[in-house]
């Protein structure tokens, strides 16, 4: 009897120990999951989709942008968080044999225009100035909310641009251009104003890789449809409509995204367009990005995934003391700044401009200047004779 | 010192030019002809390509299937036309309205300067009928035109039938961004001219046309169609227009892409396209096509309705259906599909056609020579005139300087030797007389036709032509110079210098706008103009000069044209054709504003008479 008693007691103890260990393992598993909950660092998603060319024969650029819009909306980003800029209206162009539609696949398989598209910047409103104002947030107060990019420092932004481009520029509306330097500066302004957490920049134009060469702000990943010196090619013409419907790179991206759902774990390394499909060589730039691309989910940028985990256990979150102290200091500072900043004072430009000019280091005159002066002196003495030398020196 | 300011060097240069002048002239002339002949070979002739981005590389699906309907319309039209004798206006109006177009008519009338024997008309009055298909979702700011010219000699009933069937098909489509005007004209080109003048609100040819009630916007492009049979074996395209103007090459490229797509047999100047351009056969056939195009462009006639559209900078082509003895035939559906495709592509245009060439030569339907490559040919020919003029100038100057030194002219205030002053006065008379003859040649035939018919048993048209020839020949018998000079050499040399410069200026200006005419006249007139002088074998030079006069060039080119078309003429036929061509030339000047007649009579004939004067200088 005592043996059975001891045995049963041992079994109970063992069971309790096992249960506790399982419980602790389970608890730590949940804590790991909780850690993973905040892995990516962003809390909201935005998308800025720009089509920069007009005219009927640039149908494919509008179809490109609308297909990315469609995918992004399907994966969860709402219209209030999408800024869609289309430079021309293909759906209602008098040459469209199927009015109110924009197709991306031939034989009219997929109408990317749909019936709930919301275009924020349309027709002649798509200009370089408006695009830069959207990005940097320097927008007049009368701008409606749907035309603003109201991102914060925890937003992941997808920026997609398509149109006609060249080495270092992208053409807007056949009348102006944006250069890669301007774009890089705009992104730097966004970084300094804490307007993004991470940025994915996709461009589908000829020589698209030149547009991301000049970026210098952190947390930007860039994809382009072709290298410098290469043209991006269009995909398929539709003989009933009479134009090319899509570009190859975006067609591949669309097909890829059609297989993504909000729960998929596909990462950015899978988004590579093979040469047989794209013909041009797509490029990418990840040196400014702090995470490894294979840890970046597609839905981090293309979707807006609300992470919900249901658990019945309580989780003890570790307080990070450093964060607590710095946030306390910020609170104190905020109390001092009581007046709201006005529009003109968002960036203290006045302080910057009226600074004393920095003393530049003195450099000896370059070869050109020296040569020029030597030439002048030689000519002078040749014309007037060497005897004048004694009056100079 | 400088080359031209140093008297020693200048004399050396002068001696060089004088000594080498004849070989240089011969070399330059041969170079000009050789350059022209080399235009058909591959580095100078290039493949055509579509330059307009909006018309793009994508093909559109054609869905026209109204062949039966077109044939039914054609039969009805032919029957009504036979019954009424003229254009069945009421039937056309009814049918166009039933097809769904906005229909309007326009009446016009014109009294020709003298009766037209080829078309048998004198007092012309008729009605044009046109229907407008409005673009469903666009403002009516631009339009395209499909026109069928109906005359008494060519009924074009199948073309009218196809036009109506195409209108019915087009009316059912919603993708038109431009209005389409379907125009049927009476008395073919006269009706087209009346409609165009009323559409653009101008009056350049004295046509009386009623104003248009309905208008469609600026015309971007036009296609004229001529079909007289139910089936065709090939489609011939005509590009040369009034005064040698040409449509934008992109329109021809568009037609050619649809020929290739539909597998149609398309010809240019009635000749098939050579396949092989690397061996000699291809370029030789290309040379024939090129020469035919040069002759047609030089004549300055509108070779179809399209020629009249070009004046208003509306790009236009004429398509003619040819029914020959080939095995494989195409029906109206194939032609309709090609037209549908062309119009659909033209619909995509955003601006007028301007990306491709406006001045070109065509050795074949898919090959062209651009203006930058063919201009040197005429440049070399005109260089001969320049060299000759330079030589004469130097000879005159030397002779003047030679007279000065022994004469010891008093004081430095006489820059010109006295004999040159007399020379200038003696130049004025021949110039005035030859210009007066030219003016008589221009004005008298048409003015004096009634007087001529009263005195001679001829019809008015014959009277005009015979008066032309009479005045032309009378110019040869003019008195030549008014008074003797002490240095007769200087007189004719001065006159020849002026004549050479005059000829060079005229040919240069002509070649800029109508290269073919300039080149043709330069090939014939330049050698004899350079050779003309009173010394030497006078009869030989006279015969040569007559053989290269403008009228003889016209005669020769007619023979050449028929020879190239493989339907050679006998002498009698050729002479008849020549007389008819003279009458047509005068008539077309008065009815359409063609410039060949005034250019030849007021410009080149007086110049040629000056050389005749030089030849017979005493």
Image (cartoon, rainbow, N blue to C red):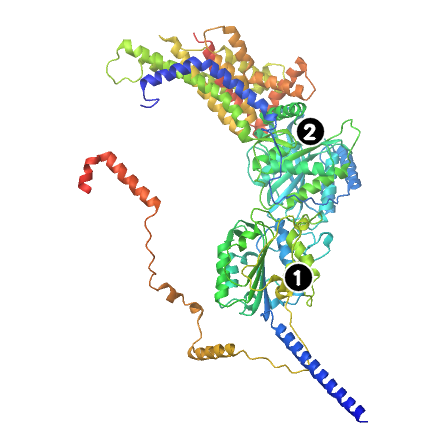
Looking at the image, residue B468 sits to the left or right of residue A353; the answer is: right
Locate residue B220: give its quadrant.
top right
> Residue A62: where, in percent of width, then height?
62, 55
Residue of label 2: B273
Looking at the image, residue B289 sits to the left or right of residue A216; the answer is: right
User: Mark 2, residues whose alpha carbon is within 10 Å: few (<14), some, or many (≥20)?
Assistant: some
Q: Is residue B429 visible?
A: no
Q: Is residue A291 visible?
A: yes
User: Mark 1, residues whose alpha carbon is within 10 Å: few (<14), some, or many (≥20)?
Assistant: many
Image mark for residue B265: none
Residue of label 1: A70
Q: Is residue A281 above or below residue B342?
A: below
> Residue A27: where, in percent of width, then height?
66, 80
Instruction: Evaluate whether label 2 is on the same chain as label 1.
Output: no
Q: Secondary structure at mark 2?
A: loop
Q: Is residue A151 above or below residue B299?
A: below
Q: Nearer the viewer, residue B460 or B412?
A: B412
Which chain is mark 2 on?
B
Distance from Cα at disc 2 to Cα at disc 1: 50 Å
Q: Is residue A187 above or below residue B311?
A: below
Q: Nearer the viewer, residue B606 or A200?
A: A200
Residue drawn at (32%, 50%), measured in percent from left and top? A364
Q: Residue furthest front?
A: A3
Q: Are marks 2 and 1 in contact (CB under 8 Å)?
A: no
């Amino acid at each position: 009897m005592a043996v059975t008693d001891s045995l049963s007691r041992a079994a109970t103890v063992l069971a309790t120990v096992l249960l506790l260990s399982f419980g602790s393992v389970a608890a730590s598993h949940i804590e790991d999951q909780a850690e993973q909950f905040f892995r990516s660092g962003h809390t909201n998603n935005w998308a800025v989709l720009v089509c920069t060319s007009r005219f009927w024969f640039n149908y494919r650029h509008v179809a490109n942008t609308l297909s990315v819009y469609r995918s992004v909306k399907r994966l969860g980003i709402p219209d209030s968080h999408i800024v869609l800029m289309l430079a021309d209206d293909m759906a209602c162009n008098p040459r469209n044999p199927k009015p109110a539609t924009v197709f991306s696949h031939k034989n009219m398989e997929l109408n990317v225009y749909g019936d709930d598209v919301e275009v924020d910047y349309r027709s002649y409103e798509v200009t370089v100035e408006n695009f830069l104002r959207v990005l940097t947030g320097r927008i007049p107060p009368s701008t409606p909310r749907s035309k603003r990019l109201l991102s914060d420092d925890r937003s992941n932004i997808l920026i997609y641009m398509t149109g006609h481009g060249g080495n270092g520029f992208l053409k807007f509306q056949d009348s102006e251009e944006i250069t890669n330097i301007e774009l890089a500066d705009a992104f730097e302004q966004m970084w300094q104003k804490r307007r993004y957490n991470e940025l994915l920049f996709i461009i589908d134009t000829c020589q698209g890789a030149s547009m991301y060469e000049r970026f210098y702000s952190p947390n930007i990943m860039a994809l382009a449809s072709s290298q410098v010196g290469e043209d991006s090619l269009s995909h398929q013409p539709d003989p009933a409509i009479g134009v090319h419907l899509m570009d190859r790179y975006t067609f591949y991206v669309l097909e890829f995204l059609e297989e993504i759902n909000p729960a998929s774990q596909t990462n950015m390394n899978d988004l590579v367009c093979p040469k047989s499909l794209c013909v041009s060589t797509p490029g990418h730039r990840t040196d400014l990005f702090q995470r490894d691309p294979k840890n970046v989910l597609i839905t981090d940028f293309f979707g807006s995934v609300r992470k919900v985990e249901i658990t019945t256990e309580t989780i003890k979150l570790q307080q990070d003391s450093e964060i607590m102290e710095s946030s306390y200091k910020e609170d104190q500072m905020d109390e001092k700044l009581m007046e709201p900043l006005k529009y003109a004072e968002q960036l203290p430009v006045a302080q910057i401009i009226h600074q004393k000019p920095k003393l530049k280091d003195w450099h000896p005159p370059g070869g050109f200047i020296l040569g020029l002066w030597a030439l002048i002196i030689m000519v002078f003495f040749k014309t007037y004779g060497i005897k004048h030398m004694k009056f100079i020196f | 010192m400088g080359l031209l300011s140093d008297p020693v060097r200048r004399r050396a240069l002068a001696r060089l030019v004088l000594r080498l002048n004849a070989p240089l002239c011969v070399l330059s002339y041969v170079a000009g002809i050789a350059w022209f002949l080399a235009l058909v070979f591959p580095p100078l002739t290039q493949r055509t390509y579509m330059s307009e981005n909006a018309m793009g590389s994508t093909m559109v699906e054609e869905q026209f299937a109204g062949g039966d309907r077109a044939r039914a319309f054609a039969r009805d039209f032919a029957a009504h036309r036979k019954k009424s004798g003229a254009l069945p206006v009421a039937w056309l109006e009814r049918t166009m309205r039933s097809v769904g177009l906005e229909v309007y008519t326009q009446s016009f009338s014109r009294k020709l300067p003298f009766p037209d024997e080829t078309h048998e008309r004198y007092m012309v009055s008729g009605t044009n009928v046109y229907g407008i298909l409005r673009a469903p979702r666009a403002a009516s700011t631009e339009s395209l035109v499909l026109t069928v010219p109906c005359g008494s000699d060519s009924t074009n009933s199948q073309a009218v039938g196809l036009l109506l069937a195409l209108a019915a098909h087009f009316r059912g489509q919603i993708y038109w961004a431009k209005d389409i005007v379907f125009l049927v004209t009476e008395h073919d080109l006269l009706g087209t001219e009346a409609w165009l003048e009323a559409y653009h609100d101008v009056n350049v040819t004295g046509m009386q046309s009623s104003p248009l009630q309905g208008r469609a916007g600026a015309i971007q492009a036009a296609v004229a169609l001529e079909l007289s049979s139910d089936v065709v074996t090939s489609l011939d395209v005509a590009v040369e227009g009034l005064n040698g103007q040409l449509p934008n090459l992109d329109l021809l490229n568009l037609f050619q892409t649809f020929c290739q797509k539909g597998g149609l047999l398309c010809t240019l100047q009635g000749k098939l396209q050579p396949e092989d351009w690397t061996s000699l056969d291809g370029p030789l056939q290309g040379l024939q096509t090129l020469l035919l195009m040069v002759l047609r462009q030089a004549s300055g006639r509108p070779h179809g309705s399209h020629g009249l559209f070009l004046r208003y900078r509306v790009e236009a082509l004429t398509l003619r259906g040819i029914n020959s003895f080939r095995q494989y035939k195409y029906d109206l559906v194939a032609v309709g599909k090609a037209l549908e495709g062309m119009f659909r592509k033209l619909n995509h245009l955003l601006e007028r056609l301007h990306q491709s060439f406006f001045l070109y030569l065509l050795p074949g339907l898919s090959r062209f020579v651009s203006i930058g490559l063919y201009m040197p040919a005429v440049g070399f020919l005109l260089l001969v005139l320049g060299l000759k003029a330079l030589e004469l100038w130097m000879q005159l100057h030397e002779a003047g300087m030679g007279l000065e030194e022994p004469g010891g002219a008093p004081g430095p205030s006489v820059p010109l030797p006295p004999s040159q002053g007399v020379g200038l006065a003696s130049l004025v008379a021949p110039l005035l007389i030859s210009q007066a003859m030219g003016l008589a040649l221009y004005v008298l035939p048409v003015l004096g036709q009634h007087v001529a018919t009263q005195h001679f048993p001829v019809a008015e048209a014959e009277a005009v032509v015979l008066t032309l020839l009479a005045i032309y020949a009378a110019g040869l018998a003019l008195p030549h110079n008014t008074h003797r000079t002490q240095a007769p050499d200087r007189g004719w040399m001065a006159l020849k210098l002026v004549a050479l410069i005059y000829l060079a200026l005229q040919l240069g200006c002509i070649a800029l706008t109508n290269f073919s005419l300039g080149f043709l006249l330069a090939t014939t007139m330049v050698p004899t103009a350079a050779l003309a002088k009173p010394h030497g074998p006078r009869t030989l030079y006279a015969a040569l000069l007559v053989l290269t006069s403008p009228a003889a060039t016209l005669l020769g080119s007619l023979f050449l044209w028929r020879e190239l078309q493989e339907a050679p003429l006998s002498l009698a036929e050729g002479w008849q054709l020549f007389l008819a061509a003279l009458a047509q030339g005068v008539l077309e000047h008065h009815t359409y504003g063609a410039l060949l007649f005034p250019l030849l009579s007021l410009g080149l004939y007086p110049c040629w008479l000056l050389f005749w004067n030089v030849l017979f200088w005493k």
